[in-house]
């Protein structure tokens, strides 16, 4: 799972800056930046905190960051459709 990708996608959907997410999650902005850049791994606790700060469930966060290996058994078109559905679900939760 690529937590940085999930974070970037959700920030874009929600129209938030990294500092906004960091403040909402009560995490250091540099840590959030490093996660998003793929230079730090996010702990399960950080993923939970970031998901909550972005107004989505942990499974939605994890699916938005899923890699090919995480999505074994579904086609590329199914994965794209799943991504679209998740993005729509994320936007319906508001900011």
Image (cartoon, grey):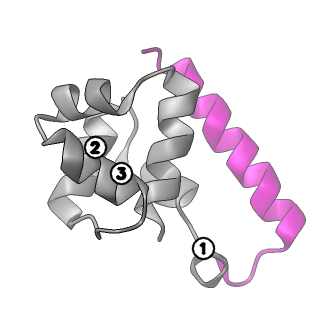
Instruction: Give the mark, 2 or 1, whose residue is nearer the N terminus.
Output: 2
Residue drawn where x is 57% and y is 23% of the image = 91
Callout 2 touching callout 1 (CB < 8 Å): no
Is residue 68 toward the left or the right of residue 44 in the image?
A: right
Q: Nearer the viewer, residue 7 or 32?
A: 32
Tag 1 residue: 67
Q: Among all residues in the image, which is located at the extreme right?
A: 77
Residue drawn where x is 56% and y is 30% of the image = 12
Q: Which residues are magenta?
A: 71-95
Q: Few, some or many C-alpha atoms within 10 Å of disc 1 (few <14, some 14-19, many ≥20)? A: some
Q: Position of residue 69 (x, y in %)?
A: 61, 84
Whether 13 is drawn above or below 77: the answer is above
* Labelled disc at residue 58: 3
Residue drawn where x is 51% and y is 44% of the image = 8
Tag 2 residue: 50
Q: Position of residue 9 (x, y in %)?
A: 56, 42
């Amino acid at each position: 799972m690529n937590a940085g990708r999930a974070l970037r996608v959700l920030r874009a959907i929600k129209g938030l800056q990294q500092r906004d997410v960091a403040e909402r999650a009560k995490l250091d902005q540099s840590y959030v930046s490093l996660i998003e850049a793929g230079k730090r791994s996010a702990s399960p606790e950080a993923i939970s905190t970031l998901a909550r700060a972005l107004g989505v469930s942990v499974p939605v966060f994890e699916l938005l960051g899923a890699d090919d290996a995480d999505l074994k058994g579904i086609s590329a078109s199914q994965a794209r459709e799943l991504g679209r559905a998740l993005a729509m679900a994320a936007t319906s939760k508001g900011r």
